[in-house]
Image (cartoon, rainbow, N blue to C red):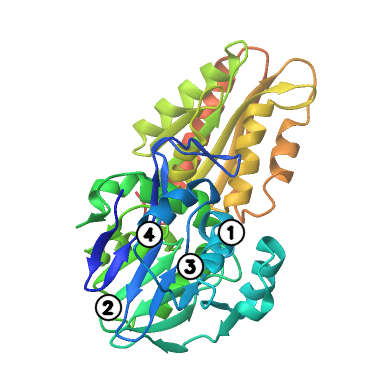
């Protein structure tokens, strides 16, 4: 697409990738993604904020075809989907400085082989005057790499936030008015990328609180003209208080675990507890991650395979441990044939979650009445814990 003006003298010059379906060989992209780069023209100087993934460099070339001079290329983040086309930009504009945070310098040199003499390191809070356009650099580490920074355009009140507030979404609507129309992609992006750093994200939210922000321009997804909506969403997602929600990843081989999961879902629902089950034989892990953002309880349902939990469920355990959601309680339900260490292996797979483990329900073979009674007691226990937190 052609460049779009998002504020006076400020242009989106990035690329929409409608066809990409996997990020980092891990994260599903059901809606594609975008690589947002921005051009800011001052009276005296011009700055390019970020570039695009190398696979899309031709789109960036087209969008900058009429731009004769760039004085500064700002690298908010060293990951290749943002910085991968920096070598081309520095070759195209041989007089340009590469501007970055102090922690980013070595990363850009190591990852992209950028010549050190082209790099200008800026401090947290430092400004750069372009002539009627003043860039203020704000260190925002761990959203989501340690070197990440954001840029605030003082005159136009635009926050170029890099990854946070972003969404993996390819759309012709480069600018939107509110978060509601892309709430799910934005929450999914937060869950998959930002949630492991929830407390640091919260600190960065406090850091930008004094700023008057009229526009948020992230590095993926649409630009927000109603920044308050996405900031409020981030305040909720990073808050310590979970919602009245149980996330239940499960899988079943011969029906025993499926019958237990069905009984537990019904029991929880009868007690006023919301449940979101995910059959890991076919689940979208992005939706699982997104649901973990709000969950108070994680219950894993699994049959036993070679002493341990079914590998599909173990993947969900690994994901939950890596994403570090704010869940408070956890448990396990499932079945075995003759022996197993499923519960112990699931517990040891969640060292990053500081949770209260509720009594598991494990049966041998097909569940009997006493097993269903135990599942009802587990539902009672979950409901009680949620009430104690004021969630019910």
Q: Along the polypeptide, which appears first: circle 1 or circle 4?
A: 4
Image quadrant of residue 9? bottom left
**Front residue of this view, candidates 289 and 300:** 289
Which mark sits nearer the N-terminus, 2 or 1? 1
- Name the residue rendered at 53%, 18% in the picture: 258
Task: Label 1: state its secondary structure.
Answer: loop
Tell me, yes or no, whether the two marked residues, 2 and 3, touch with CB atoms within 8 Å. no
Question: Which of labels 2 and 3 is toward the front?
Answer: 2
Residue for badge 4: 65
- At which x and y percent is residue 51? 47, 61
Which circle marks residue 79 in the picture?
Answer: 1
| First reached walking from the N terminus: tag 2 or tag 4 | 4
Disc 1 and disc 4: Cα gap in Å?
24 Å
- Write down the residue under mark 3: 201
Label 3 neighbour load within 10 Å: few <14, some 14-19, many 20+? many
Disc 2 and disc 1: Cα gap in Å?
Answer: 26 Å
Numbered label attached to residue 157: 2
* Camera-side residue of 364 and 232: 232
Q: Residue farthest to the left?
A: 177
Residue drawn where x is 34% and y is 63% of the image? 66
Above or below 215: residue 342: above
Q: Is residue 330 left or right of residue 235?
A: right
């Amino acid at each position: 697409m052609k460049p779009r003006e998002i504020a006076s003298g400020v242009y989106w010059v990035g690329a929409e990738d409608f066809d990409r379906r996997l990020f980092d060989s891990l994260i599903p992209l059901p809606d594609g993604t975008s690589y947002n780069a921005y051009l800011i023209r001052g009276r005296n100087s011009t700055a390019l904020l970020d570039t695009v993934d190398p696979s899309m460099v031709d789109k960036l070339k087209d969008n900058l075809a009429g731009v004769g001079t760039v004085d500064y290329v700002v690298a908010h983040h060293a990951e290749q989907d943002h910085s991968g086309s920096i070598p081309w930009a520095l070759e195209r504009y041989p007089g340009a400085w590469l501007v970055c945070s102090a922690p980013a310098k070595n990363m850009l040199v190591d990852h992209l082989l950028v010549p050190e003499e082209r790099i200008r390191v800026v401090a947290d809070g430092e400004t750069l005057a372009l002539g009627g356009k003043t860039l203020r650099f704000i260190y925002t580490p761990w959203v989501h790499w340690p070197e990440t920074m954001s840029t605030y355009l003082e005159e136009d009140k635009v926050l170029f936030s890099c990854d946070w507030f972003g969404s993996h979404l390819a759309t012709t609507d480069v600018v939107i008015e509110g978060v509601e129309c892309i709430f799910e992609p934005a929450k999914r992006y937060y869950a998959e990328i930002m949630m492991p750093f929830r407390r640091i994200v919260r600190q960065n939210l406090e850091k930008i609180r004094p700023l008057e922000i009229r526009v948020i321009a992230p590095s993926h997804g649409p630009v927000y003209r109603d920044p308050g909506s996405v900031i409020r969403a981030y305040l909720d997602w990073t808050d310590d208080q979970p919602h009245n929600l149980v996330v239940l990843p499960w899988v079943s081989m011969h029906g025993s675990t499926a019958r237990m999961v069905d009984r537990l879902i019904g029991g929880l629902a009868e007690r006023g507890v919301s449940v979101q089950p995910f059959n890991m034989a076919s689940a979208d892990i992005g939706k699982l991650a997104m649901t973990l953002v709000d969950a108070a309880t994680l219950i894993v349902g699994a049959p036993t395979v070679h002493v341990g939990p079914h590998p599909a469920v173990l993947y969900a355990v690994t994901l939950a441990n890596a994403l570090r959601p704010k869940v408070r309680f956890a448990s396990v339900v499932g079945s075995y044939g003759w022996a197993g260490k499923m519960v112990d292996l699931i517990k040891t797979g969640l060292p990053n979650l500081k949770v209260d483990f509720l009594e598991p329900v494990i049966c041998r073979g097909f569940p009997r009445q006493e097993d269903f009674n135990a599942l009802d007691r587990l539902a009672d226990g979950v409901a009680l814990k949620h009430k104690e937190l004021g969630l019910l």
